[in-house]
Amino acid sequence: MGLDTFTPEDPIFKKESVLRDTYTPDELLERDRELQEYQNALKPVIKGEDPKNIFLYGQTGVGKTIATEMVLNQLETDQQKYDYLNIQRVEVLCKGLTSSYQVSVKLVNQFREASDKIPTTGYSPDAVLDMLWTHLEEQDATHVLIVLDEIDSIGNDDDILYQLPRANSNGNVPRNQTKLGVIGISNDFTFRDNLSARVKDSLAEEEIHFPPYDANQLQHILRQRSENAFEDNVLDGGVIKLCAAFAGQESGSARQALKLLYKAGDLARSRDQEKVTEEDVREAEPLVQSSKVSDELQALPTQSHLTLYSVLIMHYEDKLPAKSQQIYQRYKIAAEKVGSDIKTDRTIRDRLSQLSLKGFLDVKEKNKGSQGGSYYLYDLDIRADLVKDALKKSSRIGETLD
Ligand code: ADP
Ligand code: MG
């Protein structure tokens, strides 16, 4: 066998880009309540009044980013009818930014030409904020809506979420120049709870929860997408239903459901099949699952990688479920091995609960019996080989894994 000839012929996909994450569908299905709440929260803006700050939360893949895009596009169109309005928006994807400082720098740079951008080190936090206030004030806008997507990335370092909502009232950005509204979007349910009290009150004036989709909703979404993505009649009867069932059970994420359908189609095409079958979906499922695990793992900090690594080793030694203290002993060895700082057991306990929240670990509370009190037992909640592959790919402990 040698090389095949490249040809554009494709009996499976009509337009596969429709299944990619970058595609914006015309319509957001199954999110009527959320869209209504969202538009309602923005009502003061179209009246020319002060915006409310809005906080959106829900797991990944449930439509938060796309809903924001659609709602703000609508606002942009509708405001043109009113002379007293000039609403602008600034959007920052905070993924990978781990401090308020980094977010401020990125915000400042949104207003600057390429030749004039500021670096991520070198200025004091106050100096960066001052630049930001100046840019905001200088905008020729009645309102600026600041969208901070995946803001949970900054963790506890949340000062920017204190500063932005107050910039109008404390005069940093005078109201009569530019009215500010903050839209914070979080994938992490616990992020809001862990915000400092001073931030919580001002940021979350309006909270909108995006719940996971159930299998029926996912079917609806997939059906609509597949009409434009696939050639007519190439999907076997149960294909969409099965994709929706897998994703519904696993995560409730439309992103995952779409990936699964795309991968199944891709497998069918690579084998010159005429149709996509349920078999293809079953085969695609672990592939998609493992890339999802690996994506999510990559986003975690090193200490979480090390913690998970320790649990994985204990799995292979058949020592699970285990208490956090036992895992901590393992962790110390692992941290030493890769030359990382050794954190306190308290930190590792936090990492363990974060890993549980993200669905990597399963945790059970046990009572101590007559002594009273309780403790937690941790176990892996996803397949060990997936964790292993993902850790191998995604972190510096990968090399020690064999
Ligand atoms: P989140 O920001 O919550 O992680 P996104 O808004 O990025 O999720 O949506 C993930 C993917 O799923 C995108 O490709 C999006 O187009 C699609 N999607 C999510 N919800 C819907 C929906 N209700 N209808 C159609 N497509 C959707
Ligand atoms: Mg998003």
Image (cartoon, rainbow, N blue to C red):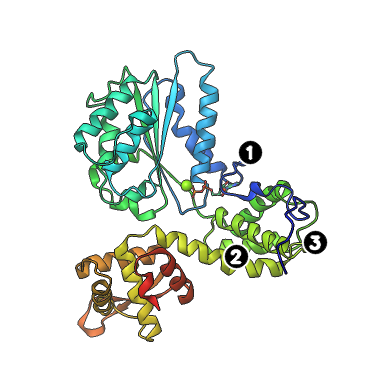
Gap in Å between the C-alphas at discs 2 and 3?
Answer: 23 Å
Left/right placement of residue 400 relative to residue 275 reads left
For the residues bearing labels 2 and 3, Cβ distance under 8 angstroms = no
For the residues bearing labels 1 and 2, Cβ distance under 8 angstroms = no
Q: Is residue 259 above or below residue 372?
A: above
| Label whose residue precedes the other's in the sequence (2 or 3) | 2
Instruction: Determine if residue 358 is in view.
Output: yes
In the rendered structure, which amino acid carries the disc numbered 2? Phe
- Residue 231 at x, y percent in the picture: 77, 51
- Point out the frontmost of discs 3 and 1: 3
Q: Quadrant of the N terminus?
A: bottom right
Left/right placement of residue 64 relative to residue 271 reads left
Q: Is mark 3 within 8 Å of ligand 1?
A: no
| Label whose residue precedes the other's in the sequence (1 or 2) | 1
Crowding near the residue tagged with mark 2, few <14, some 14–19, many ≥20 C-alpha atoms within 10 Å: some
Q: Is residue 111 above or below residue 59?
A: above
Indicate which disc residue 26 carries.
1
